[in-house]
Image (cartoon, helix red, strand yellow):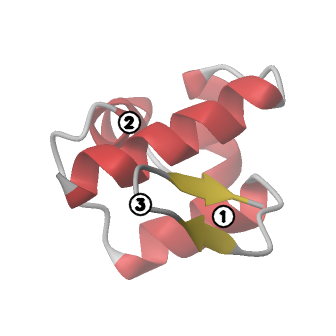
Amino acid sequence: VVASRIGEAIRIRRTAFGLSIKKTAEGAGLHPNTLWNIEQGLIMPNALSLFQLYHFLEAEDLLPSDRDLRLL
């Protein structure tokens, strides 16, 4: 459940910027398949991958709520 919520938050932020998986993965230093698996909630990203994604997506904070997670 946690992995899918993190992946969804990343996907929402990525699409809000109009970025493709390939462009986001390249900018964050990840393989596109890795990012796709993270977004699908199939794998739990490690701390470094999350840091790289948050940095590339210009996220300053993670706001949890009862139902979702949002990158701000």
Q: Nearer the viewer, residue 30 or 66?
A: 66
Q: Amino acid at mark 2?
A: Glu
Q: Is residue 36 left or right of residue 23?
A: left
Q: Residues within 10 Å of mark 1 (few under 14, many from 20)?
A: some
Dot 2 falls on a residue whose secondary structure is helix
The x, y position of residue 61, in whole percent, is: 72, 75
Look at the picture and state if 44 lies above or below 18: below
**Crowdedness near tag 2: few (<14), some (14–19) or many (≥20) residues, C-alpha within 10 Å:** many
For badge 1, the amino acid type reads Tyr
Which residue in the protein does label 1 denote? Answer: 54
User: Marks 1 and 3: CB-CB under 8 Å?
Assistant: no
> Please, is residue 60 above or below residue 5 in the view?
below
Specify whether 4 is left or right of 39.
Answer: left
Q: Residue furthest bottom?
A: 47
Residue found at x 75% / y 56%: 56
Please determine whether, in this image, residue 69 is positioned above or below residue 16.
Answer: below
List x then y, in percent, for residue 32: 44, 31
**Which residue bears the numbered disc 2?**
39
The crowding category of the residue bearing disc 3, from other C-alpha atoms within 10 Å (few below 14, some 14 to 19, many at least 20), is few
Residue type (three-letter) at the residue carrying disc 3: Asp
Disc 3 marks which residue? 66
The C terminus, quarter of image: bottom right
Which SS class for mark 3? loop
Residue 29 in view: no
